[in-house]
Image (cartoon, grey):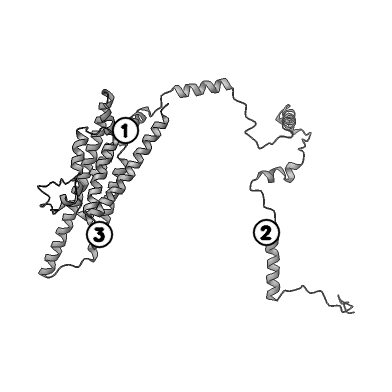
């Protein structure tokens, strides 16, 4: 007897649809990605999973068994009281379960803490006492320091690395190498000397400023002394200016009179200039407290710059370029001083 067939009607079994077209695969992938984008973001904390879990959603049931009698007679009562007290509360909020602090005790603790000397009080006092020494020249010191670093980097770029420096073989190459080394050492010495001069000048300025501050504390200033404190910083910066295209000198310090005008290369100076003026003349007036008002100082500086621009009329003249540079710096400083004076006048009661 033959075994009956599992498909007597001869009907073909259903076949799973297989996507073989590339476009259909892309469309299916696009629809899946679209569903993922539209999905709501999940909560990033575990609180939602703990609060909405299957276990925590059910009310805890305490079975009445013999084990509770063995553990303790009041355990069931304590658990029921805990559940009743925390009904409707967030069991994971530990901050709200803390006991509130008493305000009087907190105020007393803060008062004792403020009255206690800081453990670094000595360090703070030393830092505060050293602040006046660092005020005023920090910006200039940093600028000088950065200029020295830039100069060192430039010199380093000019000198080829030792690993790639060819060893001189002939006598001429040895002489040339020795000459280059001597020039390099000379430049380094000049840079060190300039840096040392700048540091010494900054130290002298700082020392003089501290002495003036101490003197003002002990004595009463005259109007001329009070005025000098206003215009002296401008004069000092003009005096300390140096011009690299003139060899690092300041030509405005040079005194030109009728006796030495020919020797300094300006024989026709007094044919063009009627009233000579320079920083040396201004320095004499500054030291002797000759200026009675700020306008007198400004007039002398502007006369000096006007003479320089008038005598050196050629735009390419290096002395005219130096005069224009000094004029820009002077106008900027004078504008700042006038703005401070006007602001102080507004603050004074009428």
CB contact under 8 Å: marks 3 and 1: no
Which labelled disc corresponds to residue 1? none
Is there any visible trace of residue 104 in the rendered image?
yes
> Where residue 29 sits in the image (x, y, percent)?
68, 67
Foreground pick, 191 / 204 = 204
Q: Nearer the viewer, mark 2 or mark 3?
A: 3
Secondary structure beneath label 3:
loop
- Residue at 40% x, 34% y is 343
Q: Is residue 200 left or right of residue 49?
A: left
Mark 3 and mark 1: span between their CA atoms?
44 Å
Between circles 3 and 1, the one closer to the viewer is 3
Residue beneath disc 3: 316
**x, y (%) of residue 77?**
74, 28
Label pair 2/1, CB-CB below 8 angstroms: no
Q: Which mark is residue 37?
A: 2
Check disc 1 and report its element: helix, strand or loop.
helix
The quarter of the displayed image where residue 57 is located: top right
Residue at x 15% of width, y 68% of height = 168
Residue at (41% x, 27% y) in the render = 118
Question: Does label 2 or label 1 sit earlier along the sequence?
Answer: 2
Dot 2, crowdedness within 10 Å: few (<14), some or many (≥20)? Answer: few
Please state the horizontal and vertical placement of residue 120, each as a whole percent of the image: 38, 29
* Mark 2 secondary-structure assignment: helix
Q: Nearer the viewer, residue 5 or 179?
A: 179
* Residue 142 visible here: no
Along the horizontal axis of the image, is 69 left or right of 303? Answer: right
Q: CA distance from mark 2 to mark 3?
A: 70 Å
Going from the N terminus, do you reach mark 3 or mark 1 first? 1
10 Å crowding of disc 3: few (<14), some (14-19), many (20+)? few
**Badge 1 is on which residue?**
132
């Amino acid at each position: 007897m033959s075994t009956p067939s599992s498909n007597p009607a001869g009907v073909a079994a259903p076949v799973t649809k297989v996507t073989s077209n590339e476009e259909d695969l892309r469309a299916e992938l696009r629809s899946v990605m679209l569903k993922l984008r539209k999905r709501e973001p999940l909560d990033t904390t575990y609180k939602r999973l703990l609060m909405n879990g299957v276990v925590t959603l059910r009310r805890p049931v305490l079975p009445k068994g013999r084990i509770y009698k063995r553990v303790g007679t009041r355990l069931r009562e304590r658990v029921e009281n805990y559940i009743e007290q925390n009904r409707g509360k967030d069991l994971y909020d530990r901050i709200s379960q803390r006991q509130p602090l008493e305000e009087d005790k907190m105020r007393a603790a803060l008062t004792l803490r403020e009255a206690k000397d800081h453990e670094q009080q000595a360090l703070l006092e030393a830092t505060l006492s050293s602040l006046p020494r660092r005020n005023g020249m920090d910006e200039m010191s940093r600028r000088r320091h950065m200029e020295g670093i830039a100069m060192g980097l430039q010199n380093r770029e000019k000198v080829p690395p030792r690993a790639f420096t060819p060893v001189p073989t002939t006598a001429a190459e040895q002489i040339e190498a020795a000459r280059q080394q001597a020039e390099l050492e000379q430049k380094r010495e000049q840079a060190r000397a300039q840096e040392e001069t700048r540091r010494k000048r900054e130290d002298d300025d700082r020392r003089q400023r501290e002495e003036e501050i101490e003197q003002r504390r002990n004595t009463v200033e005259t109007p001329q002394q009070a005025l000098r404190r206003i215009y002296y910083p401008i004069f000092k910066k003009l005096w300390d200016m140096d011009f690299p295209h003139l060899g690092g000198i300041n030509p405005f310090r040079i005194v030109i009179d009728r006796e030495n005008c020919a020797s300094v290369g300006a024989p026709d100076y007094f044919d063009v200039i009627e009233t000579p003026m320079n920083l040396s003349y201004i320095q004499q007036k500054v030291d002797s407290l000759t200026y009675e008002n700020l306008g007198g100082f400004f007039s002398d500086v502007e006369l000096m710059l006007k003479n320089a621009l008038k005598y050196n009329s050629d735009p390419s003249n290096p002395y005219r370029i130096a005069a224009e540079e000094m004029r820009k710096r002077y106008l900027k400083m004078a504008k700042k001083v006038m703005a401070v004076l006007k602001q102080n006048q507004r603050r004074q009661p009428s």
